């Protein structure tokens, strides 16, 4: 049995001989202790490596576990790093999900380009993950479960034990005389994974002894299907659908309903937003497909919101409320930080633009739209409503409410970097100042108003 485990390990790690360094996730439990022992046996033929233990501070004995791992590595002359998480799980969040995300973020921070993190996930972990994803109604990407390897910027994460069962690892550890830690939280049946492991899977294995291996094949098939769907989505989004981060609705609507859902998922993932539930995704697709071009659509879900403006849809993190009130800018020669995460304002030299002399010695402030603002532009006789100018320029309502308005002695002098009032404009060929608004990335600028 030990030879079979060793051969399975070597078959996988032979694909990573050129890594400048290996990092091994070492919890001190059975699985990672076996992984460490396998690496030690081939130490002379492998890249330099070191062990990393992550203390989540979720158990009163967690510091003792870190100390055990440190001593284990010192006795074998293995470089060791202890990472202690300082944050606590958010109220109402899944502790399991939080711990996993925080752990991988901490581990990724230890990697340099081209380096590899090895973790001790095995076939039973794969079976549990597949079933949990199925019970959540996951599609092919979720049912792919644990990937044998994947990108973990700036390096990679690999799972060389994924083809082996927990029973095989236990038999190996006993034959090798290894000692390992037992995490008492693994026996807590209130956690979904532990309930599967302790209650459901023993019954499953009695009827289907090869469940872990056969489900691993299903996960592999799902991973292949997910890759094909992703390739299709990328090709279609790249050529026809996504323009400057916006979803062009006309080419999107030319696809079938199933294809539209695929493109929506791809679009949101590409922007970096969490994916909505299947039901919410269906609602988003219907609203975008059937709303008239004159309707302003706003659809919110946990972690994101979708807005439609004219012929495009825009996705973004939930926007904070538009600011109100005013903000003094006592020295326009320096930058001004705007409220509500709206970026900064500063002035840069340009031909035309604002006349700097009209700002000197005046009360300069920044306000935000309240409604009814008017401005007279150069070459025009009458003042125009700011709302009408924004509409003609294709500036979306959510941007209009967040446009920084420059007021000088109580008079509207400029609207972001878009318009300058005639009374404050420099001569066209004279050196003036441009009001530069460094907008946050999370505030999409409508396609029709860009440029």
Image (spheres, rainbow, N blue to C red):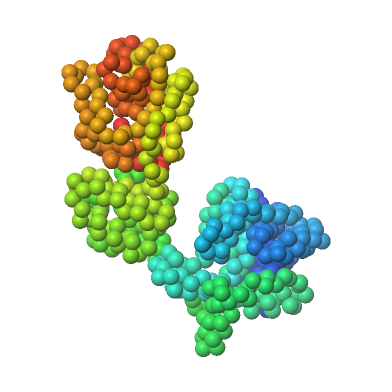
Image quadrant holding the N terminus, namely bottom right
Q: Residue at x 32, y 27 (%)?
A: 415
User: Would you say residue 43 is visible in this rendering?
Assistant: yes
Q: Residue at x 42, y 32 (%)?
A: 438
Splitting the image into 4 quarters, where does residue 443 fall? Answer: top left
User: Would you say residue 25 is visible in this rendering?
Assistant: no
Count of numbered tags = 0
| Left-right relation of 374 to 28 | left
Image location of residue 95, percent across then percent down: 56, 64
| Relative depth, front residue between 278 and 387 | 387
Image location of residue 372, percent across then percent down: 25, 32
Image location of residue 276, percent across then percent down: 38, 59
For this orientation, the residue located farthest to the bottom is 207
Work out whether 141 lies above or below 173: above
| Left-right relation of 330 to 123 | left
Image location of residue 323, percent across then percent down: 39, 38
Work out whether 328 lies above or below 178: above
């Amino acid at each position: 049995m030990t030879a079979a485990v060793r051969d399975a390990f070597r078959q996988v790690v032979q694909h990573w001989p050129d890594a400048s360094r290996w990092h091994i996730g070492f919890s001190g439990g059975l699985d990672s202790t076996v992984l460490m022992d396998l690496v030690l046996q081939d130490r002379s033929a492998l890249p330099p490596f070191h062990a990393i233990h992550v203390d989540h501070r979720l158990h009163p004995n967690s510091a003792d576990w870190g100390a055990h791992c440190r001593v284990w590595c010192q006795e074998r002359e293995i470089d060791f790093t202890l990472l202690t998480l300082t944050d606590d799980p958010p109220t109402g969040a899944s502790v399991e999900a939080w711990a996993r995300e925080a752990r991988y973020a901490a581990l990724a921070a230890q990697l340099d380009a081209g380096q590899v993190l090895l973790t001790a996930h095995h076939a039973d972990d794969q079976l549990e993950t597949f079933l949990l994803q199925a019970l959540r109604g996951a599609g092919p990407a979720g049912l792919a479960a644990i990937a044998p390897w994947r990108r973990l910027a700036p390096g990679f994460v690999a799972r060389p034990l994924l083809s082996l069962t927990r029973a095989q690892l236990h038999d190996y550890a006993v034959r090798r005389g290894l000692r390992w830690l037992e995490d008492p939280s693994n026996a807590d049946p209130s956690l979904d994974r532990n309930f599967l492991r302790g209650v459901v899977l023993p019954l499953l294995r009695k009827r289907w002894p090869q469940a872990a291996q056969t489900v691993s094949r299903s996960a592999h098939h799902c991973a292949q299907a997910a890759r094909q769907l992703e390739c299709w989505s990328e090709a279609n989004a790249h050529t026809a659908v996504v323009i400057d981060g916006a979803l062009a609705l006309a080419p999107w609507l030319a696809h079938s309903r199933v294809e539209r859902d695929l493109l929506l998922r791809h679009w949101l993932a590409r922007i970096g937003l969490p994916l909505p539930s299947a039901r919410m995704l269906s609602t988003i697709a219907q609203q975008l497909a059937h709303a008239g071009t004159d309707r302003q659509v706003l659809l919110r879900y946990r972690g994101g919101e979708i807005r439609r403006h004219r012929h495009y849809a825009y996705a973004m993190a939930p926007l904070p409320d538009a600011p109100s009130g005013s903000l003094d800018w006592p020295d326009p020669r320096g930058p001004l930080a705007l409220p509500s995460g709206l970026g900064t304002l500063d002035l840069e030299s340009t031909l035309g633009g604002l006349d700097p002399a009209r700002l000197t010695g005046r009360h300069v402030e920044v306000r935000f739209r309240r409604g009814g603002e008017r401005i007279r532009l150069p070459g025009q006789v009458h003042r125009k409503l700011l709302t009408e100018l924004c509409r003609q320029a294709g500036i979306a309502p959510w941007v209009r409410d967040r446009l920084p308005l420059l007021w000088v002695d109580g008079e509207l002098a400029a609207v972001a970097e878009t318009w300058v009032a005639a009374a404050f404009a420099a001569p066209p060929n004279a050196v003036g100042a441009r009001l530069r608004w460094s907008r946050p990335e999370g505030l999409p600028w409508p396609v029709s108003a860009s440029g």
